[in-house]
Image (cartoon, rainbow, N blue to C red):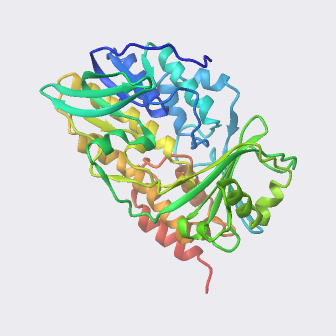
Amino acid sequence: MTDKPQKRIVPAKVDVVVIGAGPSGAIASALLRRAGVDVLVLERDSFPRFSIGESLLPQCMEYIEEAGFLPALRAAGFQYKNGAAFAWGERTTYFNFEEKFSPGPGTTFQVERARFDQLLAEQAEAQGVPIAYQHSVTSYAPTADGVCLGYCDNEGNSGQLDCRFVLDASGFGRVLPRLLELQTPSNFPVRQAAFAHIDDGIRDVNFDRNKILITVHPEERDIWFWLIPFANGKSSLGVVASEEKLARRAAQSPLQLLQQMVAETPSLANVLHRAQWNYPANQITGYSCNVKHLATDRYALLGNAGEFLDPVFSSGVTIAMRSASKAVKVLLRQFNGERVDWQKEYEQPLRQGVETFRVFVDAWYEGLFQDIIFYPDPAANLREMISSILAGYAWDTENPFVAQPRRRMKTLAQYCTPAA
C-alpha cells in the first residue's frame, strides 16, 4: 500500500461524483466503474486515517464480493469473526453467526479501519476509479441536467465540477445534509462514546478472539463496552453511555474515563488486566442523526451520511455498504432512461432494515433485549432469528423479527423479562 496518494487533477465534468472514499464510497464507485459510468471520488482526508466501526457483519461480505474486493480482503490477514459474545456480571452468552435463520455468509472480519478503508479504496482505484484525496465539497447547486459542486483542496485551491448525480458517502461528515439543511433531530437520547486502541495482553485460552465482546456495566444496564480483538494483539475498546452519566465520573481525559469505566466493570477488568494503554483515546457525543429524506433524482445519501443509529450492534458499515449497492442499481436504471422512484425503490427498502436495527437498539437500552439474550435455554429457532439480525440480515422479510420487529420483540421480552 502506498502512504502518499498521487495528486489528482479534478476534471470539469463527470457523470457521478462520490463524496468520500470510505467503505460505501469505495463500493459505490467500483460498482459504477464496472458498469462503465464515468465516476470521480472526492475524499476530504488522506488515507490511511483512523475510524471506528471496526467489527464487520457477515452480510457485508456480499457487497464486498459484488464490488470485486473479496480476494484482496481475504488475503489481507484481518482477524476472522464468526459471532458476538455478551457479558453481564457473571452471565455470559454468545451467538454463532453461522447458526442463523437467513441464508448468506456467516463469517466476516474485525478490522483496523485505517488499513481496511485504504485497502478498499485502493481496490476501487485498481478497477479504474479516480480518487482525489484532500478535496472537500464546499457547495451544491442544481443545474438543468444535474448538479454543480464547489470544492477546495488542502492547499486552498478551489474549483467547480459538473455532474449528473451525487452520491454522498461522507459518513459522519454528512456533507449534503449540512449543505442542504437536511438534518433533523434524532429521537435517540444523546449518548457519548469514549474509545481507544489498546495492546490487550489477553492470554486466557478461553477468550474467543473470533467474536466481538459486548459487556454490560454491572449496575447501570444502559452503559456498555465493546471489545473488538484484532489479529495483531491489539483491540478496539470503547464505552457508551448517556452524556450525563459519563459526566459524573471525575476523569480528566477520554483515556482516564475509559480506564475508570473498565475498573467499574470487574468481568471486563479481569479480561484486560494485562492491557497496555499505548494509544491515544478519543470521544464523540451526539452521533445519532436523522434526515428529511435520503434521495432525489440528483443525489442519494449513503450510510452514515444519511442516518446513524448507535454502535451497539455494529450495523453502520453494513447499512453503508447495502445503501451503496442499492443506490447504484437504482441510479443505473435512471441513467438508462427509466423512470425511477427513489422514495419507493431506494429509501423505503433501506429504511426497513434500519428500522429493524432501531427496534433492537431501543430494546437494548431499555434492558429488554438484554433480558432476552441472557435468558436461560431459549428456543433454538428464536436464537437463529436473532443471530440473523446480529449478523446484518435485517432486510430478510422471511425472518419474523424483520417482518414485525416491534411486535416480536415486545412479545419475546414479556416472556423473558424476570419477575419483579
Locate residue 49 relative to residue 357 in the image: left or right: right
The residue lying at 29 percent from left, 41 percent from top is 179
- Residue 13 place in picture, x, y as percent: 26, 16
Quarter placement of the C terminus: bottom right
Instruction: Identify whether 236 is placed above or below 120.
Output: below
In the picture, residue 158 is in which quadrant?
top left
In the picture, residue 271 is in which quadrant?
bottom right
- Residue 382 place in picture, x, y as percent: 57, 60
Quarter placement of the N terminus: top right
The residue lying at 79 percent from left, 39 percent from top is 233
The one nearer the camera, 321 or 413, is 321
- Residue 291 place in picture, x, y as percent: 32, 51
Locate residue 43 relative to residue 418 in the image: left or right: left
Looking at this rendering, what residue extends furthest in the front direction? 156
Instruction: Identify whether 96 is placed above or below 222.
Output: above
The one nearer the camera, 58 or 243, is 243
Q: Kindly tell me whether residue 400 is visible in this rendering.
A: no
Instruction: Identify whether 270 is placed above or below 180.
Output: below
